[in-house]
Image (spheres, rainbow, N blue to C red):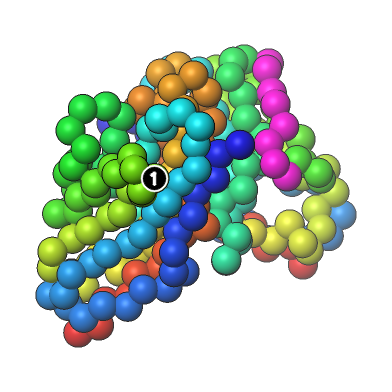
Amino acid sequence: AQSVTQLGSHVSVSEGALVLLRCNYSSSVPPYLFWYVQYPNQGLQLLLKYTTGATLVKGINGFEAEFKKSETSFHLTKPSAHMSDAAEYFCAVSLYNFNKFYFGSGTKLNVKP
Amino acid sequence: DVKVTQSSRYLVKRTGEKVFLECVQDMDHENMFWYRQDPGLGLRLIYFSYDVKMKEKGDIPEGYSVSREKKERFSLILESASTNQTSMYLCASGPQEMPFYGYTFGSGTRLTVV
């Protein structure tokens, strides 16, 4: 069975500071990996994804994530937080032959002025 | 851009009512999903559908049913609403190659059952 663990349900950073949101997965085969963002009272929006190829992937709004197979991790980073980054972030995993996603429980990012 | 439209943003219903949540997508996607989202629990899959008239149970199907009579529309039905079904409901769709492309989500319906 697949599972996704997001460490820290709430993360708080100062504006301009590094953002690091952690995601670890368990999978018996190489998965496809996704990060979604949810702004208040909205649906989820795709931030970035890893399928194959380069393990460092860049997404929208200056976010990036690195797939580390040895650590089964796909952590999300942004060098400098902006107030508009305050939202909830979800990591998700899917398998190439299975049309179903497994979501982490989410991390709420708070950005302090 | 793919658009997934949920018919209501906010809904208030009474206990025991039959409730219909509608979702329409405009990109000819084969796959459609219903999730509920609750604080601290993340997204939990209720039902999904790979094709017209086809449905499969997700992780928490109890108290819900679905209907997919047309490819673009996937309805979630609460047969007899209860207060523990107060939640945010999210619809999503994806193409056949969804594991590669990911889902597209609607804006959500916040349902309150009183």
The residue at the point 35 percent across, 54 percent down is: A37
Q: Which of A19 and A27 lies nearest the eye of the viewer?
A: A27
A83 displayed left or right of B95: left
Q: Position of residue A24 (x, y in %)?
A: 42, 51
Q: Amino acid at mark 1?
A: Thr
Specify the principal SS of the magenta part.
loop
Q: Which residue is mark 1?
A: A72
Chain containing the residue with disc 1: A
Tell me: A22 left or right of B43: left
Residue under the image location 73 percent in, 45 percent down:
B60
* Residue B8 left/right relative to A14: right
Q: Quadrant for the N terminus of chain B, please.
A: top left
| Viewer-proximal residue among B66 and A11 | A11
Q: Residue furthest bottom?
A: A113
State whether residue A72 is above or below residue A41.
Answer: above
Which residue ends up furthest to the front in the rendered image?
Answer: A70
- Residue A10 visible? The answer is yes
For the C terminus of chain B, the image quarter is bottom right
Query: Does A73 appear in magenta?
Result: no
Residue B30, relative to residue A107: is it above or below?
above
Q: Which residues are magenta?
A: B53-60
Residue B59 lies in the magenta stretch: yes
Q: Could you tell me which residue is drawn at 39 percent across and 45 percent down?
A: A72
What residue appears at the point 23 percent right and 67 percent down from the top-left corner? A19
Which corner quadrant of the image does residue B2 belong to? top left
Give residue B32's quadrant in the image: top right
Asked if residue B9 shows in the view, the reply is: no
